Amino acid sequence: MNYPYFFLEPTGISAGLDPEKFKNDFPILRKPVRGKKLVYLDNAATSQKPHTVIEAIRQYYLDSNANVHRGVHWLSEKATEAYEMARIKMQEFINADHADEIVFVRGSTEAINLVAQTYGRKEIGQGDEILITEMEHHSNIVPWQLLVEETGADLQVIHIDDNGELIREELREKLTEKTKLVAITHISNALGTVNPIREIIRSAHEVGARVLVDGAQAAPHLKIDVHDLDCDFYTLSGHKMYAPTGIGILYGKRELLQNMPPYQGGGEMITSVSLTGSSYAKPPYRFEAGTPNIEGAIGLGAAADYLNSIDFDTLSAHENEVLDYATDRLSAMDGLKIIGTSGHKAGIISFVIDSIHPHDVGTILDQAGIAVRTGHHCAMPIMERFQLPATTRVSLALYNTKDDIDSLVEGLKQVKEVFK
Amino acid sequence: MNDSLRELYEEVILDHNRNPRNYNHTPENANHTAHGDNPLCGDRYSVKLTVKDGRIDDAGFEGSGCAISKASASLMLESVKGKSLEEVEHLFNSVHRHLTDHKANEESDDELGKLKVLGGVKEFPMRVKCAILPWHILNAAINETDQMVSTEQQ
Ligand SMILES: Cc1ncc(COP(=O)(O)O)c(C=O)c1O
């Protein structure tokens, strides 16, 4: 493909895998924090950005900034071309059949709300059921609660076992003819569990239910292939996959998007407006009211290029090696308990240590330049399930190394020393 | 460990975290109660007081949270027991100033005594809320505002 010039050829990734080389792609990782080398282990909250992404955005503002789909002038044409190119990149990134199946949104949260408020309001009513799981992020719970409150539909929940895996029997029991939609996360942000979504999608389709997959945590770790998965909706957040904040995508099957009413009203989403009524544009524009986040879309396209420049098998092998190393080293620590012990995990380790509150753990690690997340991770039902007020969460990205894990373990030893 | 960490986790703080005073203690004839939480980190406490003739006769707290919030609650109840409500209000204001005002002068802090150790949070803006939460709950209990106190209101 011929990319517009401000999509720089991704650089910095060599064929062989030198994890330190990845670090060099991310300028912020070279900045000391509190006088220490930064060890960034909060990637599930948001990842850092490679210089190719930063540069793509800079170049866009230096060379091509204008509103999209509006002007006839040269710059507007450039901006539109770049914006639509980013859509094609995302289509390729998740292997969607058509570019018009990619709707630009703010992130997973907005994508899920969009589906709930358009598809949900139209297709789901009294007596129907929506099936979610106990391990969902609040953004895949609350929009459905709002919907059932409004429509009189029922919200059903698949619970998880002590390892943090979905209870299969419950899936079989609760997936019935009444189920209209299954909304499920691909990877749990609080436990790291990778769900068997392919199998779940197949079972759901057998009873005629549609499936929305929340891919916020999956996008940076797994090759996503919506064609192969045959999911009906897939959502992702750019900022967790090395792109800027405020941009993400909703994938929806063409025939579904075409039959969905608009989400918000405004410019861009109409074909004509009179004071007595309006007609709506085709997808994806029907769902992109107003001036979009153009720089965000361009940054997202550049992030997809960056990830594509590393093959996902190589990436997974490297990330899993670090994850296994971290799991081993942490498990070996006295008084440390990992929450989420599924055999299928990616990128995330939640844990508690002695009876030390995660907040104190986080503060002490921070003083050593180590960034982790502490709290309930917007997944309070999981905390309730494991009877914990909070956990400490370590989440990995491709630039994390075994050295980072060694620093973490040293930091945790200091935590134990303070609270001994 | 660096100096600011050492100041945050002073021995007194660690001691009150390990062995909180008046913890899970229900004062006899308790007549003032309030609850509060910090939804961002899951700290959650309630405070019970027995107030007689404008004075705190007895006090207890329960709940869970980080070392800073627990130690703060423990130190707080220890120091307000036996004080008049007026004195407590004055103390609340001094503590508030001590935790949040970098320029608070040392002399006016003298009345704080042991409570001074809470000032270690000044270097940790994210942790000031932890230290201050129990004090807001105490305030709510005294004023009998039935509302749940939260660090994230407004
Ligand atoms: C599993 C999961 N779903 C959804 C979200 C929401 O993503 P965003 O805040 O980018 O909309 C997150 C983010 O933390 C997440 O981890």
Image (spheres, rainbow, N blue to C red):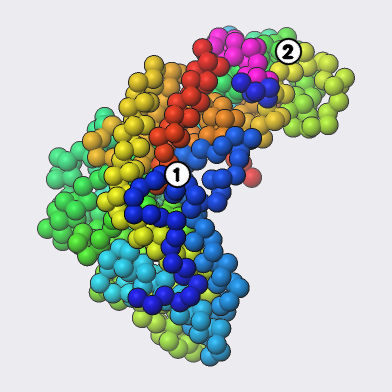
- Which residue is at a point 27% across and 66% down the rendered structure image? A95
Image side of residue A47 versus residue A322, left or right: right
- Give x and y (percent) for residue B61: 57, 17
Residue type marked 1: Glu
User: Which mark, residue B114?
Assistant: 2
Image side of residue A165 versus residue A401, left or right: left
- Which residue is at a point 83% across and 16% down the rendered structure image? B110
User: Quadrant of residue B30 in the image?
Assistant: top right
The answer for how far apart the CA atoms under marks 1 and 2 are is 48 Å
Q: Is residue A92 visible?
A: yes
Q: Which secondary structure lies at badge 1?
A: helix
Total numbered circles: 2
Q: Nearer the viewer, residue B74 or B62?
A: B74
Q: Tag 1: Cα neighbours inside 10 Å, few (<14), some, or many (≥20)?
A: few
Segment tinted magenta in the rendering: B6-27
- Give x and y (percent) for residue A268: 47, 80
